[in-house]
Image (cartoon, grey):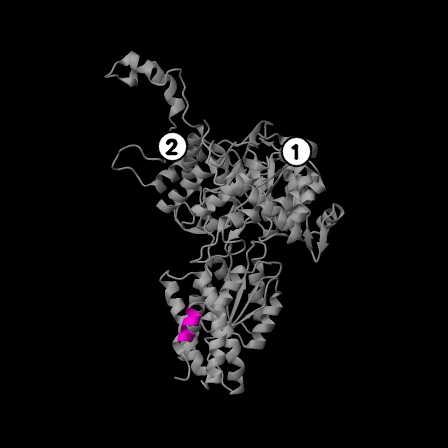
């Protein structure tokens, strides 16, 4: 049995969806992109002052064309991330401006060298099915911020990528990079390597950029991941149920725009909901209620047969401490039990304001535990214990049994040296162990074999754009000999 | 007794705007000087709330309700104050807004509410505000503080533009600039030459008080 945890009973689930449809019909959603408003208007939505009121029948019709599953592919063309069903994958948190310096233990602006190291570490950890464009590099001009992350990940990784654009023009540059990587737009559409996060602004606001972004992604055939982020009590109803309703309404509106642009394009029911802390005014990503919101939102998406995403395994601690461990570990478990297809957030600290390679390494062990948990308790043999007792007798020594040797690898997960089970009283602290582990992973890392044609194509796109920003080199990348600057 | 100061104080503590307004009206009818109603009745209620908030017995929604009640009382009393040619001493004047291109307002609005409740005169320019507008309003109101909010990494640069606009307007030496918002860090604040950064709305109030105390301390040297 695959363990699963659901927080909404059938009645509450139905009420949530009913209200989400009603909100879209009665209150409506703000939509910023004129093209999105046109699409909605011609499909029967009532538009007034930038607010679109969406008839339930329209929203239900667009839901019909959404694919219930799709894959992301690695560089070799293997489908390694399955969006759909209860499959669970993890990727690091995304787009962070700051990193916790491994040496000083203090936050500082992230640079290209940090992203390269983070990509290398992520590449080596099997717990991360996908890379994220995890850091915004402060040593490249900010208008290049979004696509430059993607370039570095493509350059140093084989894995699928969870990414996102900061503007429509740079979104197109990112398409160019992905097409260069895949060998053309047609190959990219057939075997997408990346998915793009798109964020509506709570409450109920598909800004000009967000709504246009959805249209561009749908038409390009590149998967879109809606990241709706109600903040319960501030930009969303204070009740968890009410915030889940808002999340559903925002996702439904996004799907409506997306499917009207191109029916059948892949899209994910995702989010980064959180509670609003009534004491500090912060939005704690490590709060139990935040995890409950992610679980509830995903359950609603699943009830519609849609692929899902959530934002967990992050902590609000500012250092790698016990708080970071307990918040990240417990939300990794809950996300996995909820069967969320892609869980982003590992490595993040301080309300998503700071990333950490050491935490990413530690979180990988929490994720491995969560993955073991959803493996469940299996019978493995016809008799569960009796046959083994028959062999050993009442004072049995099970260590010698052939069944023990045959089955222990399936039963037990072996954590990395980050988790101390040595019993050694002189063992170093977890931060030191995590640093050592990151160093070992980087030492063992080998850059993927990328064909010279692909390298040249990537660099050509990148240099063209970089030059427009006044840069004639590509920090973090050694240019192939064939490419002239 | 002319005015029921205990009931006024309680109406703020309870976050009851209707009751606060009606007590303010009653006080005026009874001939209580408006400044006395504020200083002995309503303002102590706000101080109680601040104290309870610090002790984690009251929370932001409680504080917002009390701020609303305070506003209701003040809207009754302020016209009377003006008529008497009196003015309540303010802790300072603050101009707030969210940077150009950014439509997020919750953090900035919360800062404004808490500053108002703490006796500051706050002018909220709203969202998507050009840097020149910050400078113009700061000049008009002779602001002590300009607070600039940004939620996005892309609009954060607008905070630097506000610092520059104040410089161009020749106001930089007389106005303290504070910045905040999810992607903003102390380091960014230093980099753009802002005077302060606060992680959340509550620490923003402390920051503003500290900055002004420091300035007044410098002024009085």
Q: Secondary structure at mark 1?
A: helix
Instruction: Using the image, tell me which numbered label, if any, was put on residue A467.
Output: none
Q: Residue B151 placed where, x, y %?
A: 55, 56
Residue drawn 37% across the image and 21% down it = A408
Q: Chain of mark 2?
A: A
Magenta span includes A483: no
Q: Residue furthest left?
A: A395
Q: Residue B159 placed where, x, y %?
A: 55, 62
Q: Nearer the viewer, residue A484 or A39?
A: A39
Q: Nearer the viewer, residue B34 or A80?
A: B34
- The overriding secondary structure of the stretch rendered in magenta is helix
Which residue in the structure is indicated by mark 2? A416
Which residue in the structure is indicated by mark 1? A188
Bounds of the magenta segment: B7-13
Compared with A218, A126 (above or below) is: above
Q: Nearer the viewer, residue A235 or A473?
A: A235
Residue drawn 72% across the image and 52% down it = A46
Q: Which of pointers 1 and 2 lies earlier in the amino acid sequence?
A: 1
Compared with A225, B171 (above or below) is: below
Res. B64 visible in picture: yes
Compared with A208, B130 (above or below) is: below
Q: Residues within 10 Å of mark 1 (few under 14, many from 20)?
A: many
């Amino acid at each position: 049995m695959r363990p699963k945890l659901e927080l909404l009973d059938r009645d509450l689930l139905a009420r949530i969806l009913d209200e989400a449809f009603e909100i879209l019909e009665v209150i409506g959603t703000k939509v910023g992109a004129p093209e999105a408003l046109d699409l909605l208007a011609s499909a029967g939505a009532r538009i007034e002052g930038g607010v679109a009121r969406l008839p339930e029948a329209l929203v239900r019709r667009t839901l019909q064309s959404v694919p219930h599953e799709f894959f992301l592919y690695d560089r070799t063309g293997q489908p390694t991330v399955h969006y759909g069903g209860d499959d669970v994958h993890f990727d690091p948190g995304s787009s962070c401006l700051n990193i916790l310096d491994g040496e000083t233990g203090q936050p500082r602006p992230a640079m290209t060298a940090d992203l390269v190291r983070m990509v290398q570490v992520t590449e080596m950890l099997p717990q991360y099915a996908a890379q994220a464009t995890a850091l915004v590099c402060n040593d490249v001009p900010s208008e290049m911020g979004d696509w430059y992350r993607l370039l570095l990940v493509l350059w140093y990784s084989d894995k699928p990528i969870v990414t996102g654009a900061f503007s429509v023009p740079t979104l197109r540059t990112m398409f160019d990079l992905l097409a260069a990587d895949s060998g053309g737009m047609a190959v990219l559409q057939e075997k997408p390597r990346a998915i793009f996060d798109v964020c509506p602004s709570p409450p109920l606001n598909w800004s000009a950029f967000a709504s246009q972004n959805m249209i561009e992604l749908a038409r390009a055939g590149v998967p879109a991941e809606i990241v709706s982020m109600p903040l319960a009590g501030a930009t969303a109803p204070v009740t968890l149920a009410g915030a889940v309703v808002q999340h559903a309404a925002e996702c439904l509106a996004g799907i409506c725009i997306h499917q009207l642009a191109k029916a059948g394009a892949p899209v994910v029911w995702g989010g980064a909901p959180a509670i609003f802390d009534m004491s500090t005014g912060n939005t704690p990503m490590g709060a139990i209620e935040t995890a409950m919101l992610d679980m509830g939102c995903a359950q609603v998406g699943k009830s519609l047969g849609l692929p899902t995403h959530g934002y967990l395994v992050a902590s609000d601690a500012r250092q790698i401490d016990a708080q970071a461990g307990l918040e990240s570990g417990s939300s990794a478990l809950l996300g996995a039990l909820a069967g969320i297809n892609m869980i982003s957030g590992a490595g993040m600290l301080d309300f998503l304001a700071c990333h950490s390679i050491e935490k990413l390494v530690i979180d990988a062990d929490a994720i491995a535990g969560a993955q073991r948990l959803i493996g469940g308790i299996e019978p493995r043999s016809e008799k569960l214990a009796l046959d083994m007792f028959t062999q050993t007798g009442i004072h049995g020594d099970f260590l010698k049994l052939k069944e023990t040797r045959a089955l222990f690898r399936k039963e037990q997960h072996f954590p990395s040296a980050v988790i101390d089970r040595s019993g050694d009283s002189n063992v170093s602290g977890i931060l030191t162990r995590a640093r050592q582990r990151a160093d070992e992973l980087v030492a063992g890392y080998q850059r993927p074999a990328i064909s010279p044609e692909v390298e040249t194509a990537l660099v050509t796109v990148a240099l063209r754009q970089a030059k427009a920003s006044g840069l004639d080199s590509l920090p973090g990348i050694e240019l192939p000999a064939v490419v002239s600057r | 007794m002319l005015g029921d100061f205990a009931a006024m104080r309680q109406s703020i503590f309870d976050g009851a705007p209707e009751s606060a307004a009606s007590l303010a009206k009653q006080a005026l009818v009874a001939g209580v000087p408006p400044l006395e109603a504020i200083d002995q009745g309503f303002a102590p209620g706000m101080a109680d709330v601040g104290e309870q908030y610090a002790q984690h017995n009251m929370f932001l929604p409680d504080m917002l309700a009390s701020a609303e009640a305070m506003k209701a009382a003040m809207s009754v009393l302020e016209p009377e104050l003006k008529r008497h040619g009196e003015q309540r001493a303010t802790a300072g004047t603050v101009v707030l807004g969210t940077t150009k291109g950014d439509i997020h307002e919750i953090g900035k609005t919360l800062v404004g509410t808490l500053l108002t409740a703490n006796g500051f005169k706050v002018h909220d320019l709203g969202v998507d505000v050009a840097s020149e507008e910050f400078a113009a309003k700061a000049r008009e109101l002779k602001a002590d503080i300009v607070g600039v909010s940004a939620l996005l990494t892309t609009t954060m640069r607008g905070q630097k533009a506000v610092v520059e606009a104040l410089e161009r307007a020749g106001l930089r030496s007389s106005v303290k600039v504070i910045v905040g918002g999810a992607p903003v860090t102390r380091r960014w604040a230093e980099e753009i030459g802002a005077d302060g950064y606060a992680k959340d709305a509550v620490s923003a109030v402390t920051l503003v008080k500290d900055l002004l105390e420091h300035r007044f301390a410098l002024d009085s040297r």
